[in-house]
Amino acid sequence: MPDALADIPLGVDCAVMRESTCRDFDETGRTRRAAPVATVSDPATASAMCDGIIDLIAIFFNVSGRQLRSPHRTSRPVSRVRQIGMYVAHVTLGMKMTAVGTGFGRDKSTVVHACHTIEDMRDDEDFDVIVSRVERLISVAFSLDHHAVRADD
């Protein structure tokens, strides 16, 4: 298992994920990001959005939502999942880092660290596939990607 994935509790086959992931690349070769949500200025809304992200990533990675919400230090796998959630909240939803920090019960500096760490780890292809899947999940859940939501015919 690649080092970037060693800290993440996975129950998925990355090779299968990679083959089934349809990527949309920008001119630099990085995965395109979804259009961000309008700036969230209301702390209650930001907190609710982060709660939704925490619930989704808890299910996706099979991690306890209680551990993800814990104000205390947690194990590395739980911390890594939380970092992915913070990264997606900032990058995919376009939330300000201070709002993400508040929603996750952390400081802005922790969110900055999480975003830098996850961006650096995305150089690993398997890890990038996983983060892309989480970005897609959050985009669909927050209705950023209207084409991904299929109407029942």
Image (tube, rainbow, N blue to C red):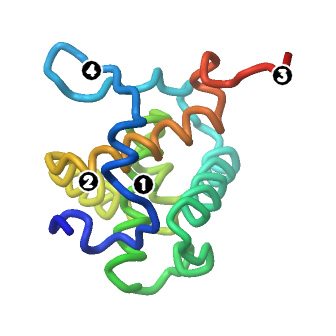
C-alpha separation, residue under disc 2 versus residue under disc 4: 18 Å
Q: Which mark is residue 86?
A: 1
- Mark 3 belongs to which amino acid? Asp
Label 1 vs 4, first from the N-terminus: 4
* Residue neighbourhood size for the residue with mark 2, other residues' Cα within 10 Å, grouped as few (<14), some (14–19), many (≥20): many
Q: Which residue is rendered at x = 58% and y = 53% of the image?
A: 53
Callout 4–callout 3 Cβ contact below 8 Å: no
C-alpha separation, residue under disc 1 versus residue under disc 3: 32 Å
For the residue labelled by badge 1, is the local secondary structure a helix, a strand or a loop?
helix
Whole-percent x and y of residue 80? 34, 68
Answer with the quarter of the image where residue 32 lies. top left
Q: Which residue is mark 2?
A: 118
Quadrant assignment for the N terminus? bottom left
Q: Which residue is mark 3?
A: 152
Please state the total of marks drawn on the protein image: 4
For the residue labelled by badge 2, is the local secondary structure a helix, a strand or a loop?
helix
Callout 2–callout 1 Cβ contact below 8 Å: yes
Whole-percent x and y of residue 64? 59, 77
- Vertical side of 52 occupied by 33: above or below: above
C-alpha separation, residue under disc 3 versus residue under disc 2: 36 Å
